[in-house]
Image: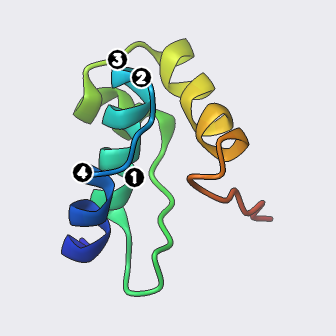
Amino acid sequence: MSNEATNATLYLETKSPVRKAVLLALANWCDQDNRCWPSIKQLCRVTELGERTVQRAPAELTEAGLIEKEHRF
C-alpha cells in the first residue's frame, strides 16, 4: 500500500464520487513504483460499486489524465 499515493489522491479533483472511490482504491494497492493490478472483482468489493460502473471508471480516469493504463500479457 502506498500512503503517499493515497494521500495525493485525496486532494485530486475527479468530478465524480465514483471515479474518486475507484482512484482511492487503486492508490491503496499501489506499490513503491505507483503500479497496481487489482481485479475488477476486488475493486467492486472495496468500493461497493457495480461491475459495469467499476469497468468504466479506469477508462474515464485515463482519459482525464489521472492514471495510465499499462497492458499486461
Q: Which residue is mark 3?
A: 49
Which badge, 1 or 2, is on the more N-terminal residue?
A: 2
Query: Could you tell me the amino acid type at mark 1?
Result: Leu
Q: Which residue is mark 2?
A: 16
In the image, residue 7 sits, relative to residue 63, either above or below, namely below
Which badge, 4 or 2, is on the more N-terminal residue?
A: 4
> Does residue 49 appear to the left or right of 70 in the view shown?
left
Which badge, 4 or 3, is on the more N-terminal residue?
A: 4
Q: Alpha carbon of mark 2 to alpha carbon of mark 3: how far?
A: 13 Å
Q: Secondary structure at mark 1?
A: helix
User: Dot 1, crowdedness within 10 Å: few (<14), some or many (≥20)?
Assistant: many
> Does residue 18 appear to the left or right of 8 in the view shown?
right
Q: Secondary structure at mark 2?
A: loop
Q: Secondary structure at mark 3?
A: loop
Between circles 4 and 1, the one closer to the viewer is 4
Q: Which residue is mark 4?
A: 10
Between circles 1 and 2, the one closer to the viewer is 2
Q: Write the residue at 80% across / 65% down.
A: 73
